[in-house]
Image (tube, grey):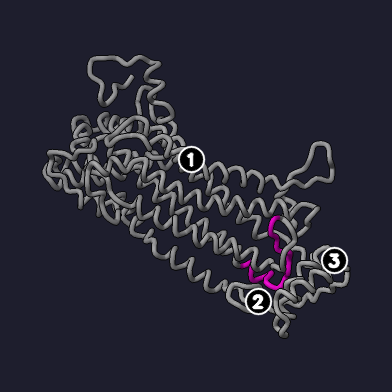
Amino acid sequence: MAKKLWEKDTTVNPEIERFTVGRDRELDLLLASYDILGSIAHSTMLNSIGMLTDDETAALHSELRNIYSIVEKGEFVIEDGVEDVHSQVELMLTRKLGDTGKKIHSGRSRNDQVLVDLKLFTRNELQNICEQVMKLFGSLIEQSESHKDVLMPGYTHLQVAMPSSFGLWFGAYAESLADDMLFLKAAYAMCNRNPLGSAAGYGSSFPLNRTMTTELLGFDSMNYNVVYAQMGRGKCERNIAFALASVAGTLAKLAFDACMFNSQNFGFIKLPAECTTGSSIMPHKKNPDVFELLRAKCNRLQALPTDITLIMNNLPSGYFRDLQIIKELFLPAFKSLAECLEMATYIIQRIEVNRNILDDSRYDAMFSVEEVNRLAAEGMPFRDAYKKVGLDIEAGLFTPDKEITHTHEGSIGNLCNKEITELMQQHFASMDFSKARNAEKRLLAR
């Protein structure tokens, strides 16, 4: 069994090891490629300050790239008795390169290793989330434009209220995603700062060049204060979780609407047959299980910031093993949200809209405000018009005029989808994903 990086003469109780390692071996597989990128950047910097020779650096880089290819093929494993991805990579280097492999840890700690791994992982996953959000946004805008003239009831207190439209309904969720992108933008900026070189949280006596590793890894800047670099763990994940939760909140509300509007009592929309499931006893059932599960998954994601806060909120400065548990909540959240976005996009693109909802007389009363406004525009005091229309409705004398002439910005007749799209594109374009991707490619270039 491989010795721990920190192990000396004492053997750890197996049950203690099992408890303290937890799910690290499983979850650290998600960080393996990023640990290697960080190690290439770190060893390049060590070479620049005379801690590694050119030959040692070349050998390390060659082997690190070999390990990276193993990760990419899905063949990388963390062996029994090896605590985490950092230990596994160093073990593989030492087996192949001997003492040269042992030198790579100079000037760093597993504390700043996991910090940089998490930040590299997170910025990559945030790019994926942002791209998925853009796809859903595009589908919503497309549907909004396609159905901008199809009226539907609007509700307050789940009571029929005023005229709305499918243009408004689809477009509302598109604009909600545009606001969510602001949170994602802030999350990306927060995670795109370099903690490498903070070591265990107090720096190093080696003359590390942190500006170099910042540039090599494509970060926008570094976490300057080494104590704060460590204090930022937990805080960074929590704030990024707020961004994920914001997107999840939009999806959960959309899912609720879709489930409700798809029911026979509403009949406003029809989900694609291939996106519904049946009943084991009722042959007529077409259940919106995808949206129901999407709603549940997204509601759980909205609890993520609180879960992280409860783990890290009462910790003083410095590193504590409590932070390991955050990984178990944080790392899988990206895949969960990405899957929800993908499913929502697929169904929104294929959803069928009922164009004849208002043929049902139960919705006639939603045009009451239109009549009140017409009378007020002709000179009748608003309160008098309100009372007249109300009494007409109660007496069964109200005949709705279903011609809608809303023209102001953001209304049925003026959706402002162009402006919403420009806003979203501005938010998305402000994140320079190419800088990070190009930096990673350069590190892996032979």
Residue at label 1? 332
Residue identifier under label 3: 394
Element at label 2: loop
| 307 up-or-down from 137: above or below | above
Q: Amino acid at mark 1?
A: Pro
The stretch in magenta equals: 142-157
The first of marks 2 and 1 along the sequence is: 1
Going from the N terminus, do you reach mark 1 or mark 3 first?
Answer: 1
Q: Amino acid at mark 3?
A: Glu
Helix, strand or loop at mark 3 = helix
Q: Quick one: 257 or 107, which is closer to the camera?
A: 257
Mark toward the viewer: 2 or 3: 3
Q: For the residue carrying disc 2, how many other residues have a C-alpha within 10 Å: few (<14), some (14-19), or many (20+)?
A: some
Query: Is 38 displayed left or right of 183 in the figure?
Result: left
The image quadrant where one finds the N terminus is: top left
The residue under the point 48% across, 41% down is: 304
Residue 407 point in image, percent of width and height: 63, 79
- As shown in the figure, which amino acid type bears the numbered disc 2? Gly
Q: Nearer the viewer, mark 2 or mark 1?
A: 2
Residue 166 part of the magenta-drawn span: no
Q: Position of residue 46 (x, y in %)?
A: 17, 43
Tell me how far mark 2 sits from mark 3, CA to CA: 30 Å
Residue ID for mark 2: 413
